[in-house]
Amino acid sequence: MEQIKDKMANKCVFLDRDGVINKDYVDYTYTVERFEILEGVIPSLQRLKEKGYLLIVITNQSGIAKGIYDHDDVFKCHDYFDKESGHIIDAYYYSPYHQSTTESLSRKPGSLLFEKAIAKFDIDVHQSFMIGDRERDIIPAVHLQIPTILIEEHPNTPTIAQKKVHSLKEAADWILST
C-alpha cells in the first residue's frame, strides 16, 4: 500500500492595499500616477517572501460601485505594483462593491475574499497574518482566526488587532521575530 505524505498547508501574509502598500487618498487611489508605494514596502515584502510566506492582497475598491473608476483602473494599479516589486504578490482579491449600492460578503469586513484565497492556496490560518490599516481589515481576519496587525495611522487607535505598528516594515519585523 502506498504511503500518503501529510501535505503542509501554506503560510500567508494577507495585506490590505491602500494605506499598507501605497498611500491612501481620501478620494481614492485609482491611477498609476497617484499610486505612491510607501517607503520600505518592497524590501519588507521581499523579506516575508524569502521566509516562505505567500503574499495576498485583499482590498475594498468601492470607487467602482460609486462610478468613480472601473475595474481596468484597478488592474493598471496592480500591474504597476507588480512591475515595481518584481511580481512579488501571489494574488490580488478586490471587492468592487459599496454598501450604498449593494451589500456583499466580499467587501471587508466580510470574509468571503479571505475564504476564497484560503481555499485556493491551501492556507493555514494559524501560520498566517493579516496586515491592515483599518478595523474593517482586521474584523474578517479575527473571525477566521488569522493573527492580525494594525498599521496605526493615529496614536491610541482602538482595535481588536493583536499588534499595532507604524509601518509595513515594523509588521514584517514582528512577523519574522515570532
Image (tube, grey):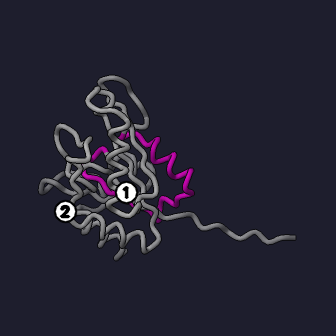
Q: Amino acid at mark 1?
A: Asp
The residue lying at 38 percent from left, 70 percent from top is: 48
The residue lying at 34 percent from left, 33 percent from top is: 70
Q: Amino acid at mark 2?
A: His
- Label 1 sits on residue: 82
Where residue 120 appears, x then y in whole percent?
A: 56, 51
Quadrant where the C terminus sits is: bottom left
Quadrant where the N terminus sits is: bottom right
Decide: is 76 above or below 169: above
Q: CA distance from mark 1 to mark 2?
A: 24 Å
Please tell me how crowded label 2 is: few (under 14), some (14-19), or many (20+) other residues with Cα within 10 Å.
some
Nearer to the camera, 106 or 162:
106
The residue lying at 60 percent from left, 67 percent from top is: 8
Range of the magenta residues?
A: 108-136
SS at badge 2 = loop
Magenta stretch: residue 110 in it? yes
- Label 2 sits on residue: 166
